[in-house]
Image (spheres, rainbow, N blue to C red):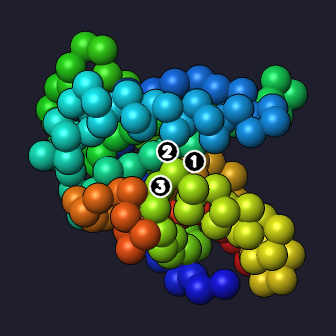
Amino acid sequence: MDYRIVEKEAFAVVGKSIRTSTVEGENNRNIAAFWMESNQNGLAEELAQVSGELGLLGVCLDFNNEQEQLTYVIGVESPFNSIPEDWDEVQIPSATWAVFPVHGAMPDAMPDVWQRIFSEWFPSTGYQHSGGPEMEVYLSDEDPYSENYYSEIWIPVKK
């Protein structure tokens, strides 16, 4: 698999979040619906207007293996001194990240690369997940449903 290693200092992400189950792929369905809602209600556009170099972010955090749940945030690197009352702010710690390109239409292209990272890449590279949030990075303002759409998955790693 194609990847690169990136060092990034700690930063804050602001946006909105959902809590979802990971049982039987429910998180994939709920996250796709959350993105659709965010595109329809203007949240994604509002965030895109203030996004930093990473563009729009989908951040997976607060994994609870026993309850099989995670929190998913649609947001951007925080450019705000204060955030709207109904938004969330999460801290992303400094980390070494494995960054994987994702080519193809959303929402289908993203789950395929996630699956390959854990079934192929981790077992074959000697890297381990270092804990903490994982990110989907949407750098382009092009049509995310295009077969040529480019995005990335960022996973904190250690050798």
- In this rendering, the answer to whether 63 lies above or below 106 is above
Query: Where is mark 3, residue-wise?
Result: 106
Seen at 51% across and 51% down, the residue is: 107
Seen at 86% across and 75% down, the residue is: 123
User: Callout 2, which amino acid?
Assistant: Val
Quote the CA–CA distance across marks 2 and 3.
16 Å
Q: Earlier in the sequence, mark 3 or mark 1?
A: 3
Seen at 39% across and 49% down, the residue is: 57
Query: Where is mark 1, residue-wise?
Result: 133
- The answer to whether mark 2 and mark 3 are in CB contact below 8 A is no
The label nearer to you, 3 versus 1, is 3
Query: Where is mark 2, residue-wise?
Result: 59
Q: Quadrant of the N terminus?
A: bottom right
User: Callout 3, which amino acid?
Assistant: Met
The label nearer to you, 2 versus 3, is 3
Residue 92 position within the rendered picture, expressed as x and y whole percent measured from the top left: 46, 47
SS of the residue at dot 2?
Answer: strand
Mark 2, other Cα within 10 Å: few <14 / some 14–19 / many ≥20: many
SS of the residue at dot 1?
Answer: loop
- In this rendering, the answer to whether 150 lies above or below 131 is below
Q: Residue furthest top?
A: 85
